[in-house]
Image: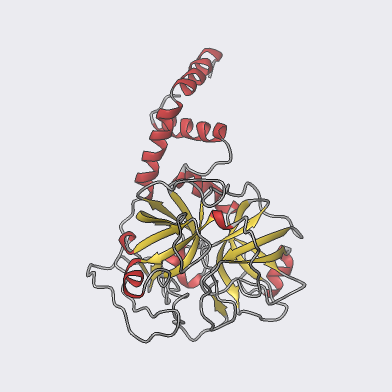
Amino acid sequence: MNLSKLIVILAFIHCHYKHLNLLADAMLEDNLNIESAVLRSNYKSFYNVLDEVKNTNEAPLTKVKSKSESFANSSLVKTREDDEFVFLVAGGYRPEKNDFAKYVVSLRLVYMEDEYGFGFGHFCGGSIISKKVILTAAHCLTTRGSITLAKNIKVIAGTTRRLLRNKQTQELTVASVKLHPNYYEYKKIYDIALIKLKDELDLNEEFVSIIPIANEKPLTGQLCTIIGWGVILEGGPVPDDIGNGDVTINSDAYCASRISGFNKDLSVCMSNPKNYEVSGSNGDSGGPLICDNKVVGIAAYVVRIGHATLPFAYTNVYYFREWILRNGVCCLTNKLEHIFLAFVIAFINQNIF
């Protein structure tokens, strides 16, 4: 490319930045639209309510690559006897001022909220990576191999309280969901998904804010934080207030020696060597691992709560950064990077070069 073409291109970017952003958002809409399947599973309330609540929507199932039971409803009721893994803050704490809560949302089942009340439909967490995109775990959005319908999910932001609305609470409906194409439920790998909201979040620095995605894998020994509405004790109720847990990133070799099937590329492994009770727990699934104010991990699979000396693993966000950007065009760390990506996508697709 000669200098004159480069000057023209840079001038075009300067003059049409808003147009490129609109184009990027439209591309996001297309990429995130996938054919969803009806959620066919019975749920129970958090406090062992035995009434079965069935989804009345009837539609053909769209199967994902899976051979096992889903844990999308793991925060509501235990659905399998295998206790080796429980889907994700046990042993954590609740700071007086939670600086990370503004990045986190609660994912709710609409009909559970309608049946039992606000807060009883919580099943997973997620991270705000743009005004209209939530980063979460793929297993949160599947049940018995079928993808949860977008209309069955609502997103709650702006509050640390699961059961209490306040003036900062924002409730948003979902336009579409997108799971990673290589996600296999029974293997617990590629456990990452995006949720596209119908409307934009109302951002503010104190209660609802975007968290940048990782631009590198966290370093061994790095101090980080996990956060969510997970149970405090195994088998216990889901708490009302969000909780934090301090963790240290473990080496890949250490994790591989203690977690069967650990993949150093797909996963980030951590523990709290001073308190092995700290781990993710039921209800934390999909929530973030935060290091240096970036989301570096997604609560995916952990070992049994309180299992002495064993670490636990989250999905490695950095490994999936390109996939997130390609399907999100939403969550870059600065405007220049955003402009460049939007330009490349728009003009390469139109064969400008």
Q: Position of residue 284 (x, y in %)?
A: 54, 68
Name the image quarter holding residue 178.
Answer: bottom left
Colour approach in the figure: secondary structure
Q: Does residue 21 appear to the left or right of 41 in the view shown?
A: right
Residue at the extreme top of the image, as rendered: 4
Q: What residue appears at the point 24 percent right and 73 percent down from the top-left corner?
A: 56
Q: Does residue 227 appear to the left or right of 21 in the view shown?
A: right
Q: Position of residue 257 (x, y in %)?
A: 71, 73
Residue at the extreme left of the image, as rendered: 58
Q: Nearer the viewer, residue 143 or 203?
A: 203
Rendered view: 144 above or below 48: above
Q: Kindly tell me whether residue 180 is visible in this rendering.
A: no
Name the image quarter holding residue 91.
Answer: bottom right
Q: Does residue 50 appear to the left or right of 275 in the view shown?
A: left
Q: Nearer the viewer, residue 305 or 353?
A: 305
Q: Kindly tell me whether residue 159 is visible in this rendering.
A: yes
Q: Position of residue 240 (x, y in %)?
A: 51, 71
Q: Position of residue 224 (x, y in %)?
A: 69, 59
Q: Does residue 74 appear to the left or right of 113 in the view shown?
A: right
Count of all numbered marks drawn on residues in the image:
0
Name the image quarter holding residue 303.
Answer: bottom right
Query: Where is the C terminus found, in terms of image quarters?
Result: top left
Residue at the extreme front of the image, as rendered: 167
